[in-house]
Structure formats: structure tokens, C-alpha cells
Amino acid sequence: MENALTSAVVRQELIPLSEAAKWQAALQNIPHAFGHTWENCYAMHLTTGYPTYLYLLQSGDTKVVCPLAERVYRGFKDIVTPYGFSGFVSNTDFPDFQNYWLRFAAQAGYVCGYIGLNSVLLSEININLTEVVISNRLYVLDLRLPIQELYQNLNKGRKRQLKKFEERKQMYTLEKKGLKEFFLAQYHDFFSARGAASTYNFSIPTLSYLIDLNEIILIGHSENGEIKAVSIFAYTAHMGEYLFNVSLPGYENQAASLLWYGALLLKEKHVPYFNLGGGVKPGDSIASFKQRFGPLDVPLTCLKQVYQEAPYTALCEQAQVDPADKQSFFPPYWRVNSQQ
């Protein structure tokens, strides 16, 4: 599918998953995260089945991109960003962007959109987005700093925990085959036992495809030749991400060492930022675990936009939800029988 708006200077289109080479070419020369890549979006499609595209605006040498997945509710289409930290990114400033985007979204027939944003990469450009909502906090390590400075930024407890990291390094393995088998065998039970949101209920094909990618790093803790815990990281040349951690009972305390090892490997690859993610909600135990690494604290932001007011209001009224509510679940009519 190609949905294009063409003028003398600006072109907008949707690049489908079926055009991998074109998707990858569109990302060239644009600072982007793993969530923007064709590989990540294809992996997420294996779970959701949603038609998925890379939105591209091009004007001369300027490009703005964002992955989008289409959903249908009672015959009406809306859009979301696939799982991952993506959102709108560009290779240069484009202050008039929002006007072009809103017109494109309405002409494409979308009722509304939930678009996650990458606060780190977005902060380097000006594309004049409004309606930005802060939903949580993210913790990001600046890997451009010297290793000694990264270590000094750790809190006292984390320093004690990692003091003998180098001596224990032989207990960690990067051997993908065994780590993949462990991770796939443990993943669903591990997250189910912790009451994880349905967002994390990825299919085995999704997880297996991700793990096999060159842009994915697996690090495991083993004892007596048996894997006890594994952490998974993704990266591009512009940003690394902490994706998952799975461990057997009693080995949860290995997460910090595995994450630190991941940070060191990403730094060796000259990746400038390492996104640790955030907590389920601000200030929870997961957020505290990440804060002990002394990271930058940045907002987790998103867009909650309505492109066609009449059908949006009608769908909300049919679902008996408030169309004005943009502070929680969005769009609110999906809350009744689906998950965002």
C-alpha cells in the first residue's frame, strides 16, 4: 500500500513491511532507535498481525519518519506505534511538520492516533509537535562518558554489587544458542508470574526472530554449565535499549551485573546512549533499580491525537467513555475490549 500526499516540495507516504529495502533506505542518515527498524516492526507484526508501515515525509534533503501500525475498531481505523521506543525522528529541523502530518493522517482515514515518542532522539530536532503527553520517566545512560565516570555515577549499593564484576566475568556467557533456548523456555512463565501487562505477551515467532538478529545482544549468567539468568539488549548506531531480563528463582540479583555488562558492550560498539527504560509507574521498584545506575532522567512522552472528531466522539459515546479523556488509556473506546 502507498498513501501519498504530494506537493511541489513535500511528499508523504506509507512504506509497508513488504518493502523492506525501501524502509531501510528511508532510515539512512536519520538518527533512529531499534524500534524504528524494519526488523523490530516485522517482529511485532508476527504477534499483532496489524498492517504496519513506516511513515515518511520528504522535502528536499529533509526526512521525517515514524513506524505506524493500523488497527480497526467497529470499521474505523486508528494508529499506534509498534512496541519499542520509536516515534517521529528527522535528520534536520522541520518546524512546519505537524500541519503536514495532521492533514495526512486525516486524509488517510485515521480517526485517532497513539504515537509513542523517543525523547532522547526527538530532543535534537525541531518538528513543532504539540499535544505531547508525559506518561512516565525513562532512564538513559550517556555512554559517551568515560567508563570510570559511568562507574562513579553508580550509587553506593550498585558500586558494591559490581566491585568484583571483572573477577566474575567468567560466569557470563554470550553464546546465543543456549541463551535463546533458555529465554524462550522461561519467558512466558516468568512474565506471567509477575503479572506483566498483556503488552509483553509476545509470540514465540516474535521472540525467536528478535533473538536471531545481529542487532540483538544476549548475555547470560551460568553456574556449573547451567544458565540461570539472561538479559537481552538491542541497538542501532544511535541508541541501545534494555529489552528483557529473565531469571530462575533465586537469581534475580544477577540483573544488575548483566545490565552493566550490556552497557560496556554497547560502549565498545560506540553506541552513544543506552535506554534502560522506566518503571511500570514512576517510583516503583523497577524504576528504582534503574535509577541506581546514575542515568539521565528523561520524560517518556507520547502523542494522543484525534484526526476526525465526529467518528471519534461517536465511538466513545457508543463505548460509554469520555471522549475528552486523554490522560489515561487512549483511545478510551479501546479500553472496553482491547489493550493498547
Image: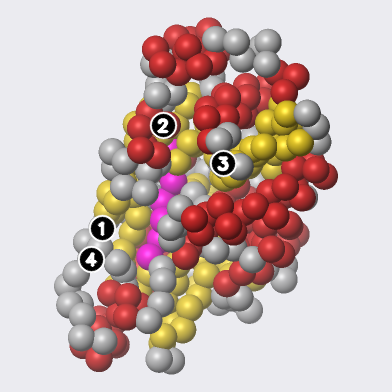
The relative height of residue 72 versus residue 121 in the rendered view (above or below) is below
Residue 135 in percent (x, y) is at 29, 51
C-alpha span from label 2 to label 3:
18 Å
The residue to which callout 2 is attached is 289
**Residue 231 seen anywhere in this rendered image of the structure:** yes
| Sooner in the amino-acid sequence: mark 2 or mark 3 | 3
Residue 119 covered by magenta stretch: yes
C-alpha span from label 1 to label 4:
10 Å
Which stretch did the figure color magenta? 114-120
C-alpha span from label 1 to label 2:
30 Å
Give the side of residue 137 with respect to residue 16, left or right. Answer: left
Q: Residue at x 63, y 79 (%)?
A: 1
Residue 27 in percent (x, y) is at 63, 50
Image depth: mark 2 or mark 3 in front: 3
**Residue 266 seen anywhere in this rendered image of the structure:** no
| Sooner in the amino-acid sequence: mark 2 or mark 4 | 2
C-alpha span from label 4 to label 3:
39 Å
Specify the quadrant that holds the C terminus: bottom left
The residue to which callout 3 is attached is 249
